[in-house]
Image (cartoon, helix red, strand yellow):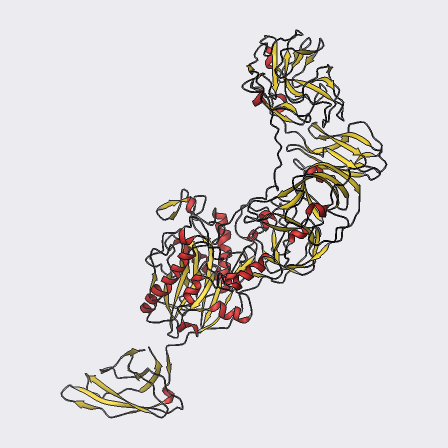
Amino acid sequence: MKKTSYLLRVAAQSQPMRRTAMAAALLGALSAPAFAVTVASADAGSKVVISQVYGGGGNSGATYKNDFIELFNRSDVPVSIGGWSVQYASTTGSSWQKTAIPAGVVLQPGQYYLVQESAGTGGTAALPSPDTVGTLALQGVTGKVALVSDGSLLNGAAPTNATIVDVVGYGTANFYEGSAGTPALTNSTAALRAAAGCTDTNSNSSDFTTGTPVPRNTGSPLHACSAPAEPPIVTTCPASLSLGVGVGGSALLSATDTDGIVNNAVITSGSVAGISLLDFVAASGIGANASVTLKVGTGVAANTYPVTIRFDNDQAQQTSCTINVTVAAPTAVTHTIPQIQGSAKASPYANTVQTTEGVVTAKVGTGFFIQDATGDGDPTTSDGLFVYTTTANTNTVNVGDLVRLTGTVSEYTPSGATRSYTELTSLTALVKLDKDRVITPTNIQLPHDDLGQVEGMLVRFTNALTVSQLEFLGDRGEVTLSSGRLELPTNRYRPGTPEALAMAAANAKNQIILDDGIFVAPTVIPYLGADGSLRSGYTVSNLTGVVDFGAKGGGGAGFKLQPVLAPVFSADNPRAEPPAMVAGNVKVASANVLNYFTTFTNGTDDAGNSGQGCTLGSSTSASNCRGADNLNEFTRQTAKIVGELKAINADVFGLMEIQNKGEYTVSKLVDALNEAIAPGTGLKTYAVVPKPASTGSDAIRVAMIYKPAALKLVGAALSDADAVNNRPPMAQTFLAPNGAKFSVVVNHLKSKGCGSAAGGDTDKGDGQSCYNATRIKQAQRLVNTFVPQVAAAAGDNRVLLIGDFNAYGFEDPIAAITASGFVNQLERFVRGSGALPYSYVYGGESGYLDHALASPALNTQVVDAAEWHNNADEPPVVDYNTDGKPQDKYTSAPYRASDHDPVVINLNLAAPYTDVSSSVRAVASGLVLNRTTGKWVGSLTLTNTSGAALQGPLQVELVGLVADATLVNASGSHNGAPYITLSGNLAPGASVVVPTTFSKTGSGTVRYSAVKVYSGTF
């Protein structure tokens, strides 16, 4: 994966709206046969069409009082339609009625013509001035309309007269163009020809959609079909604004145009005293929003007032919206908010229509929250409720308004959620009763047994909350909070134990997600500080907001807080330099470099070549590449990783997640690191440890780099190519300046992601995720087979295991390793000092996947171990990636160089031998020539003159032996001098006689300048 090396993440680009409400009306099919017609009569027939049909005028729920038929000249020449007629028949009827078009009428190119038909008893708005008035009573749901080039009445259910210019069959009508008619209409929807009337494929079902009626007449702006249509002004207006008598209120209206600037708004309906537009703000640029407030004064009398507002732009375009302002006494309350919420998980009134009342406490992207003004005093029943509705409705209320609403009580269950959330949806009434009401926040704390008891309520957290995760800050505006940092249970306890289960249960009650209230990807990343970051471990006090519930980043759902006061974070876990540690003589570090690839996902590489790919198993393609998408991202990534490694300044680095491309990619990293340490000098501070025979078949591998000036390589690197290891561990033995040897083994065990997991590798639900069985096998083979091979090759048992084990501190793979005698150094030094060991943050919980485990022989020579928290606590929005971010907060500083924190280990390696000559008196006997062998034979008597035993083995070195003499019984040579090894210890005051035998080629005597004695081995 590109962005993370641990669990497979859901990379959500933006949070969707909470749900899409749809209503479908099913109409019974009539038994009469249907007839299709293709109109291609007079030349004018291809030019003038029926552009709109509306039959719901004056019906219940309608806005307009009259039915209408709209015509449109879609050609680029004037067309005379005088003497024509529009005719109507019922769904299957054969009798037609007409409205004649007066003689002399000529339609200009792009001009509309409005034929007003009969009125009903309902509706609130008159049509724009009609061009012709008729008395046809169109059916509101289904029927058929024809445009005829003369005044003769049609006859029959499906007439074939050559004078028919156009036909529209709607609903289940049996006469239409093409293969089907338009969808059924309603009292609030019309059939509208696409492209504002321009589209004509002779197929009603293809050419028409249903939508809000938009009647246009000859005075409407012309619409030329031969030129590309200019995008229209798009308005956001509520359909209605309902107010209690004497209350007054307002609605926020807006309009935008993708290719123009909305620069004016005016009321075009009749003037009503007390109703006006205020605070118009023109769009700041093309595509920006213009806004204006529709203000209704307290003195407006009880009545319904259709208010039409026209928006204009700098292209002479106009678009209007009509708001039905109703001033009346509201409907009576059927149940209070606490009654609707009830004490159970779901509302006792779910799926029923209720009228309730509350004070608006917050407005968010998909609605607003209301709360009962007094509450019922029962802590098990929430006093708050979320109202899921349109932006237009939300714009009619303000925080502090007392509103009465009628709607459907619904139980919303987000995908992956284990519970539902009570909401009010499908509003049919929204009446403002008062304003400037104040709701006092309810004090609560985390942990909380059941936040469902305060869902929808305004609350204040009385305890300081800690930032525990920032993974979804940039794409969703989410910050996970808890009371104190949460430790992942298996980081501290063995999986499945009562302690682990209890911690998991406690953690589940100790989280809430701070959201940003907009429910889409933010254009400005919220909550970042002056340094451009926000870190896990920061705290926030007096957090106040409304408790919400919904989908969350990474999948599933959870309780959220929509803030009503801007949170103020305290930098209680500031960025720091690498940890100060107890000094030793060798520093080792482990660093996951987060898919460091020199071949990019776009198929190019760092050398500028195209058509490149990465190898995974037997496949080579760009789709196998991970990490940087291009050279720019690679350069940014390199700067951060180099900054991290340079700051740590280890003698040996074990690296994980580096491209498996021989030595090429790791060499590129070393080159960049060396240049950063000594710019322009060519100085090679670090070198690559040559790769072992096998680096595995994965696209990534482990690698090592080291300082040749500090350490020497002993033998070649080893790896374990057993089939259980998809990324083989790599081992290298080093020699320190004091002669001490030690071996480092870099590991990257199988990840926790569940792709293709089967059998014993599936998730057991114990917190260890998938592929745990494989990781156990890898760990067992590591300590039982590979480490013994490494120690044998080195001739030394001092072994350090480092790397990303994809297992937390007390999970099974780590237990398998420590059971073999290896000692967990992060437990020893980090937890041992009272701190929490962690290198990774996931799901709001912290733990360490990156380890330092020392063999018994090495354990006593580890003097310190620590993590540098430069990565895991940082939000991904500050990493090297350029995609999927609303803002680029990148800097080259070594923060979020990876998603894992590096681990640093200081060793104080004991030299393999100690000079104890000052504690020994050496007395040499005379040498006697053995004439049979030709050898000089003698002895040294060594006496321990100290008060402590000298630990064996002892090495007796003869310094300055003449060049022509050879110590025949020497055990070896050290610094050019022969030595004899004595096993066993030498007690205080004790003596030991060491035989010596020499051969000599010259004529002189056998002599040497000094005797030195060492405790230990060379």
Identify the image quadrant of residue 18.
top right
Q: Is residue 842 above or below residue 1004?
A: above
Which residue lies at the image location 61% right of the left edge and 37% below the top edge? 20
Which residue lies at the image location 43% right of the left edge and 61% below the top edge? 813
**Which image quarter is the C terminus in?**
bottom left
Identify the image quadrant of residue 311.
top right
Which residue lies at the image location 36% right of the left edge and 62% below the top edge? 781
Q: Nearer the viewer, residue 386 or 473?
A: 386
> Where's residue 603, x and y in %?
43, 43
Is residue 838 at all visible to an observer of this figure?
A: no
- Left/right placement of residue 456 relative to residue 677 reads right
Identify the image quadrant of residue 726.
bottom left
The residue most toward the top is 152
- Left/right placement of residue 707 relative to residue 180 reads left
> Where's residue 45, x and y in %?
60, 12
> Where's residue 819, x and y in %?
41, 68
Q: Nearer the viewer, residue 790 or 788?
A: 788
> Where's residue 882, x and y in %?
53, 47
The residue most toward the left is 932
Q: How many numbered badges does the structure rendering display?
A: 0
Is residue 663 at all visible to an observer of this figure?
A: yes
- Left/right placement of residue 3 relative to residue 663 reads right
Q: Nearer the viewer, residue 152 or 765?
A: 765
